[in-house]
Image (cartoon, grey):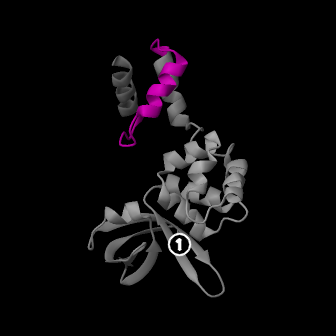
Amino acid sequence: MISYLKGKIIYKGENFVILEVGSVGYQIFVSKEFLTKQKISNVIELFTHEYLREDSRELYGFGKISELEFFWQLLDVSGVGPKLAHRIISTYRLEKLQKAIADGDLAILSSISGVGKKTAQKIILELKGKLTEGKSTQDEDEIVEALVRLGYRKQEAQEAVRKIGEDKKNAEEKIKAALKILGK
């Protein structure tokens, strides 16, 4: 299973790139949003899902592991294959999709090409309680706990941790960022 590739873009199609990795070109389907940010000759890293069938082999690529994990969750929904799951992720930002599912918003999901009302209902029914958006990591729990020890209310600390950007690498940077948010 091909799960990760790093290489140079040698071609951009309408919804895919050809990525040269070790003198081999891989066609990888990516979102239009991701595609517009890339240029030929860029070296990129993609988390991938390899889909194998008797007559084809397809790679679906994602810039973030969270997008790949959400893609896998969509594949677990009966009636959702890799092309539809990829189209869903390509249509809206991950956070918007997760919120739509958590809120039971049929309108957003059924506005996606290929997703009818019944499929949207299935996605909401099967994924509503499973989304990773609502789950906090151990790192986030430790940061919230540290903020509570500093005198902040737990709910206030959790809200600040949610607002921290993904660019913060370690717990110290995250705590400093959260304190800045709470100080405003």
Q: Which residue is mark 1?
A: 2
Q: Is residue 165 visible?
A: yes
Disc 1 packing (10 Å; few <14; some 14–19; many ≥20): few
Which residue occupies 52% across, 28% down? 142
Which residue is nearer to you in this view: 47 or 72? Answer: 72
In the image, residue 45 lies in the stretch drawn in magenta: no
Residue 132 lies, with reference to residue 138, above or below; the image says below
Quadrant including the C terminus? top left
Which residue is nearer to you in this view: 168 or 127? Answer: 127
Dividing the picture into quadrants, the one containing residue 17 is: bottom left
Which amino acid lies under the numbered mark 1 shown in the image of this protein?
A: Ile
Dividing the picture into quadrants, the one containing residue 181 is: top left
Dividing the picture into quadrants, the one containing residue 58 is: bottom right
Question: Which residues are the magenta region?
Answer: 149-171
In the image, residue 158 lies in the stretch drawn in magenta: yes
- Furthest-top residue in this view: 151
Which residue occupies 47% across, 11% down? 151
Residue 170 lies, with reference to residue 178, above or below; the image says below
Q: Is residue 132 visible?
A: no
Query: In x, y percent, where is residue 92?
Result: 48, 54
Residue 184 lies, with reference to residue 43, above or below; the image says above
Query: In x, y percent, where is residue 154?
Result: 54, 19
Query: In x, y percent, where is residue 96?
Result: 51, 46
Which residue occupies 39% across, 37% down? 170
Query: In x, y percent, where is residue 32?
Result: 40, 64
